[in-house]
Amino acid sequence: MKQSNTRLNITNALTLFVIMFIFLLMVGFEINIFISLLLSIAIGVLMLNLLTKTVSGHTKERLPRLSKEKEEFYSSKGLSREDIDYFRRTMFQAQQQIVSIEQHMQKSGKLRAIENRNNTLALSKELFKDITHEPNRLHDVDKFLYVHLPSLADLSEKYLEIEGHKAKSKTTYDILEKAALTIDKMCEQIAEDYVKFKADDIQDMSVEVELAKRTLNHKQSDTQDFDSSI
């Protein structure tokens, strides 16, 4: 979270520098001071918006407005205002990635079979909900949020793209097979993420993972919505 604040401060400082530079440059070319100021500010605001989207991992959807109740809940968990903003943006990005994964899985019989075997969507949604209830444990799920989810969303999208090719060579089928194995492994890792978050003392990881895959009803993932009040 502190890393996110540092990036934000650097972004703001860089934007201010650009505004001043453009303003002085325009004045140097003897452009009206008022017009120079307006143009430099406009360019700075545009630049700030673009950089903020990159730094914050902004997605196509807009981050929901923070309710008073949620703000009080996060504060009770020891989160500062900066921590709350970072947590909500992180979880919102994860939410969008799970939605993308669900859409990808539904478009391919092979991916759908992998998802059914691992119960990935139900586990991901359940873990997402658990994290929103314990925001102070964000560091416990760093691999789930920053590695496994984005990797699965990206690779499943690429799998669909390659699978959609009308003409496929042996090399193409080999790539698809390797990609499917990797996706299967990622789904297994997400099941492990779920088990690790839920249990403090895991006696047998393999047994617990298999149990987790069978505990949550697959049909639950078809109708389960995310808690949008992050």
Image (tube, helix red, strand yellow):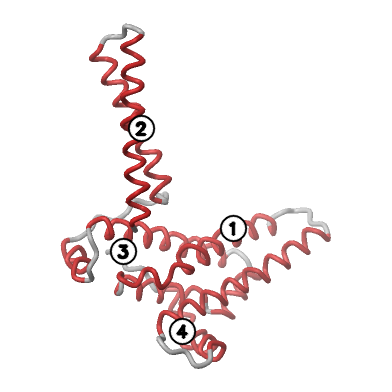
Image coordinates of residue 142 in percent, x first then y, are 44, 67
The answer for how far apart the CA atoms under marks 2 and 4 are is 46 Å
| Within-10-Å neighbours for mark 1: few <14, some 14–19, many 20+ | some
**Which residue sits at x=30%, y=70%?**
136
| Within-10-Å neighbours for mark 2: few <14, some 14–19, many 20+ | few
Q: Earlier in the sequence, mark 1 or mark 4?
A: 1
Return the residue nearer the eye: 9 or 211. 9
Q: Are marks 1 and 4 in contact (CB under 8 Å)?
A: no
The answer for how far apart the CA atoms under marks 1 and 3 are is 24 Å
User: Given the current orientation, which residue lies at the most extreme right position?
Assistant: 170
Q: Is residue 195 left or right of residue 176?
A: left
| Within-10-Å neighbours for mark 4: few <14, some 14–19, many 20+ | few
Q: Which mark is residue 230?
A: none
Q: Amino acid at mark 2?
A: Leu
Return the residue nearer the eye: 46 or 23. 23
Q: Are marks 2 and 4 in contact (CB under 8 Å)?
A: no
Q: Earlier in the sequence, mark 1 or mark 3?
A: 1
Q: Quarter holding the N terminus?
A: bottom left
Image coordinates of residue 63 in percent, x first then y, are 32, 54
| Residue on which the image places disc 3 | 228
Image coordinates of residue 106 in percent, x first then y, are 56, 67
| Residue on which the image places disc 4 | 217
| Residue on which the image places disc 1 | 157
Q: Amino acid at mark 1?
A: Glu
The answer for how far apart the CA atoms under marks 3 and 4 are is 22 Å
Q: Amino acid at mark 4?
A: Asn
The answer for how far apart the CA atoms under marks 3 and 2 are is 28 Å
Q: Earlier in the sequence, mark 2 or mark 4?
A: 2
167 is higher (above) or lower (below) than 107? above
| Residue on which the image places disc 2 | 46
The answer for how far apart the CA atoms under marks 1 and 2 are is 30 Å
Q: Quarter holding the C terminus?
A: bottom left
